Amino acid sequence: MIRSFYIAAKDLKAEFRTKQMLNSMFIFSLLVLVVFSVSFGDFLGDSAKVEKLAPGVLWIAFTFAGMLGLSRTFVMETENGCLEALMLCPVDRGAIYTGKILSNLAIVFLMEAVTLPFFIILFNYSLGTGTLLLLLLILFLGTFGFIAVGTLLSALTLGTRTRELLLPVLLLPILLPVLIPAVEATAGVLAGNSIGNLVPEIRLLAVYDLVFFVISHLVFEYVVSD
């Protein structure tokens, strides 16, 4: 696990040096929120319609902005010739996968932390402490599943010329089992439901995260070997 933290620290240090992907993700997610808030301007006074539309908008912003970062997960390694060096290191290949997940999670969580306050302001939400903590739990579970699968598929599409186009095509169908309960749970939280009413969605998100993380961890060695 310590080796995974070293790999994650290396990736984060390289990203924070240029902030290329972070800036792109911030701008994209904020642009999505602004465009949708302007488009739904006539509905913002109707809380019932906002509760149906806003959760989907939030996850659209997070998902597509996150894909910008995922598409570059292993590109830097190939550009600098570091991937072969990582493969030669006397560590489990799963440690590389875990390190990449940690760095991707840190970047995406940072993007979400900046985007969420803008979402609350643009869609006229007022969240209490308990509601905000529950929303953060949903965001964590949904984002972890998204990153776990996306990191594996980013490695799978590394050798293709159209990886930026191929990654969303492969990723979105697999993400449906996590996006649907994530949007439903987010809608429930924003509507003021307690955690007891969201147990089915939370359980489904947790199971998805666990299953796909374990599967991706096991098959990652064969993906990078090919």
Image: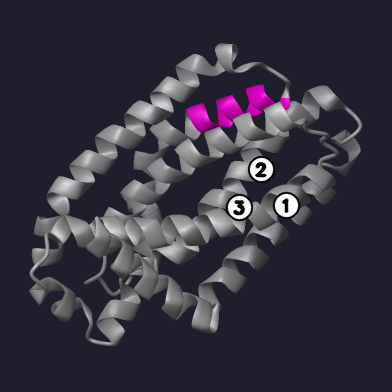
Precedes in sequence: disc 3 or disc 2: 2
Q: Which x, y percent locates residue 75? A: 33, 76
Q: Which residues are magenta?
A: 181-190
Amino acid type indicated by mark 2? Val
Give residue 129's position: percent from left, percent from top: 73, 32
Q: Which residue is mark 1?
A: 33
Residue at screen point 79% across, 27% down: 49
Measured in 3D between alpha carbons, the distance from the residue under mark 1 to the one under mark 2, in whole angstroms, is 7 Å
Q: Amino acid at mark 1?
A: Leu
Q: Nearer the viewer, residue 103 or 188?
A: 103
User: Taking the image as drawn, is residue 226 in sight?
Assistant: no
Q: Residue placed farthest to the front in the image?
A: 2
The answer to whether the residue labelled 1 contacts the one labelled 2, judged by CB atoms less than 8 Å apart, is yes
Question: Tag 2, which secondary structure?
Answer: helix
The residue positioned 55% from the left and 17% from the top of the image is 198
Q: For mark 1, give the secondary structure.
A: helix
Query: Which of label 1 and label 3 is nearer to you?
Result: 3
Nearest to N terminus: mark 1 or mark 3 = 1
Provide the secondary structure element on which disc 3 rests: helix
Q: Which residue is mark 3?
A: 112
Viewer-proximal residue among 105 and 76 = 105
The x and y percentages for residue 16 are 52, 77
Residue 134 vertical position relative to residue 88 in the rendered view, above or below: above
Q: Tell me if mark 2 has few (under 14), some (14-19) or many (20+) residues whose alpha carbon lies within 10 angstroms of its own.
A: some
Horizontal arrangement in the rendering, residue 105 relative to residue 174 (left or right): right
